[in-house]
Image (cartoon, helix red, strand yellow):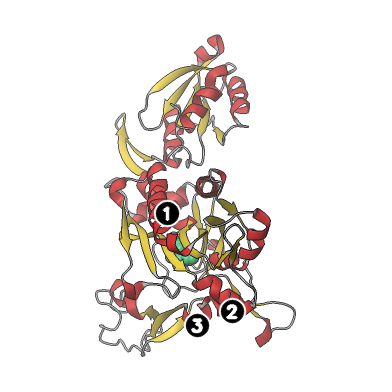
């Protein structure tokens, strides 16, 4: 993260360049929900692909799942969410606003912003009451008590409910994991900081089932593996830290949790949680469903309920951290430049194809180059405006390479490749261009 970045700049760039838009903007917005524009979708997809690659594709001991957002309501009784997934809420009788009772210090009184809620002359806060964060809807044509279902507040429970199915069909045995990426919903009392905390968001969660005596070893393993993932994708080491939860912070299911925290412009905050969930979830679901959720080792005759180690990350929050860390401003040829120094694997567009002029056969050759690269990576053809302006536009969305077709290209079938960060220009034969870019994308060069 450069020292010039602020959350306001990230919000402005996201809107200006089509990464993130406020939901239902034409109707005045819908409290803290967001839509992802063309470059936002591409960045999110790359974040999810990088996670899926590291968790599923590159490993033999983890398989994937995509469970439904709507689960049987008993799921949430068993998981403890109906009873315990709550935040303490206070209302102010004077201004009608609601606040989290444990976060009054982080909020401002709407009537007197120089003080916290409860400290203004008219503030009149109610006693705190527990507010359940699950969002409800109803299933079927009749809306009554029996039709209530919940939008899942975490993807994890769909994994526990499918433990037996996956164990039987995937021929795995502990230690093994089930990974899932999908939407979750929480009726957060206070949403804040852009896409950091929203009511609809996407999670990347993996439940790793292990023999109970090995749980601590795997917990430490996943702390390290997950931190390395962020570093390999370019987050600065100085902006990441591990923070173990205090006992009074632990979720109802956890016997130990550490957060990977990122230094956002607003301070250190959770990026991902890694929890030792013990056998809580499988035992609860076994009790509520009557199914045996355990592992039987035929070789040893041993039967046990595995413990679970869970790395749980948020796609939106990761995207925000990557944007913040990549944001930079510098000066090129006397002009201020905003540049996103995203890791090439995450960059929405990998290469921009730019004919120097819109004549002399350059656009035709540029289209040929574009068609050559298109099957390999997301590319963008742009012939509008001066070459300097086109470079700036690509720098602002984090495109690592700009491929320029000039008059020499027509003579010897070479192009120049400009590097976003070093600004070095290499002359490369068109035939060698796919390999040249692929090597850089996969880190071989
Ligand atoms: N299954 C465990 C679990 O859900 P969590 O710490 O509540 O744990 C995991 O959530 C991750 O999901 C968080 O570290 C964060 O990245 C993301 N997350 C949670 N609530 C969120 C929200 N309201 N908005 C955006 N991301 C959220």
Instruction: Please state if 278 lies on the left or on the right of 264 as rendered.
Output: right
Which residue is the site of mark 2?
A: 287
In x, y percent, where is residue 108? 30, 74
Do the residues under discs 1 and 2 have CB atoms within 8 angstroms? Answer: no
Residue 251 at what x, y percent from top left?
42, 73
Q: Looking at the image, which is closer to me, 178 or 407? A: 178
The alpha-carbon separation of the residues under discs 1 and 3 comes to 29 Å
Q: Residues within 10 Å of mark 1 (few under 14, many from 20)?
A: some
Question: Residue furthest toward the top?
Answer: 411
261 or 101, nearer to the observer: 261
Indicate which disc, 2 or 3, sits on the residue closer to the N terminus. Answer: 3
Query: x, y percentage for residue 355?
Result: 53, 24
Report helix, strand or loop for mark 3: helix
User: Secondary structure under badge 1?
Assistant: helix
Q: Nearer the viewer, mark 1 or mark 3?
A: 1
The answer to whether residue 115 is above or below residue 59 is: below
- Distance from label 2 to label 3 (Cα)? 16 Å
Question: From what the image shows, is residue 292 above or below residue 18?
Answer: below
Q: Residue at x 62, y 23 (%)?
A: 368
Q: Residue furthest front?
A: 300
Which residue corresponds to mark 3? Answer: 83
Front-most of residues 303 and 141: 303
Q: What residue appears at the point 30 percent right and 71 percent down from the top-left corner? A: 106
Q: Quadrant of ligand 1?
A: bottom left
Which picture quadrant has residue 383?
A: top right
Tell me the mark number nearer the camera, choosing from 1 and 2: 2
Name the residue rendered at 55%, 34% in the picture. 380
Circle number at residue 416: none
Q: Is residue 250 visible?
A: yes
Q: Position of residue 43 (x, y in %)?
A: 50, 46
Residue beneath disc 1: 222
């Amino acid at each position: 993260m450069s020292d010039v970045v602020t959350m306001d700049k990230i919000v402005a760039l996201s809107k200006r360049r089509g990464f993130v838009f406020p939901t239902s903007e034409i109707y005045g917005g819908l409290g803290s929900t967001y839509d992802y524009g063309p470059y936002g979708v591409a960045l999110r997809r790359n974040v999810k692909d990088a996670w899926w690659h590291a968790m599923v594709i590159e490993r033999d001991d983890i398989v994937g799942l995509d469970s439904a957002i709507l689960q049987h309501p008993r799921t949430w009784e068993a998981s403890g969410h109906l009873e315990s997934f709550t935040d303490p809420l206070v209302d102010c009788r004077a201004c009608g606003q609601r606040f989290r009772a444990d976060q009054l210090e982080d909020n401002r009184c709407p009537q007197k912003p120089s003080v916290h809620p409860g400290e203004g002359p008219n503030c009149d806060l109610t006693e705190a009451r527990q507010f359940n964060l699950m969002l409800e809807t109803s299933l079927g044509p009749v809306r009554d008590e029996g039709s209530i279902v919940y939008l899942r507040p975490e993807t994890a429970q769909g994994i526990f409910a499918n433990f037996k199915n996956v164990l039987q069909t995937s021929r795995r045995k502990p230690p093994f994991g089930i990974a899932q990426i999908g939407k979750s919903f929480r009726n957060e009392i206070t949403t804040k900081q852009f896409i950091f905390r929203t009511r609809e968001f996407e999670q990347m969660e993996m439940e790793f089932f292990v023999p109970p005596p090995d749980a601590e070893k795997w917990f430490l393993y996943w702390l390290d593996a997950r931190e390395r993932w962020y570093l390999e994708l370019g987050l600065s080491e100085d902006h990441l830290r591990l923070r173990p939860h205090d006992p009074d912070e632990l979720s109802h299911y956890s016997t130990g949790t550490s957060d990977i925290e990122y230094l956002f412009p607003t301070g250190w905050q959770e990026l991902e949680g890694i929890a030792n969930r013990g056998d809580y979830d499988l035992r609860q679901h076994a009790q509520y469903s009557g199914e045996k959720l355990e592992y039987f080792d035929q070789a040893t005759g041993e039967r046990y309920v595995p413990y679970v180690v869970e790395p749980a990350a948020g796609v939106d929050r990761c995207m925000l951290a990557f944007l913040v860390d990549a944001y930079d401003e510098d000066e090129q040829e006397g002009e201020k430049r905003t540049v996103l120094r995203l890791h090439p694997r995450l960059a929405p567009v990998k290469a921009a194809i730019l004919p120097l002029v819109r004549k002399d056969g350059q656009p035709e050759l540029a289209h040929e180059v574009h068609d050559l690269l298109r099957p390999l990576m997301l590319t963008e053809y742009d012939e509008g405006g001066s070459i300097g302006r086109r470079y700036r536009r690509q720098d602002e969305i984090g495109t690592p390479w700009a491929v320029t077709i000039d008059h020499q290209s027509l003579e010897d079938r070479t192009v120049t490749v400009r590097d976003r960060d070093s600004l070095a220009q290499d002359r490369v034969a068109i035939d060698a261009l796919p390999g040249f870019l692929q090597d850089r994308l996969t880190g071989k060069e």
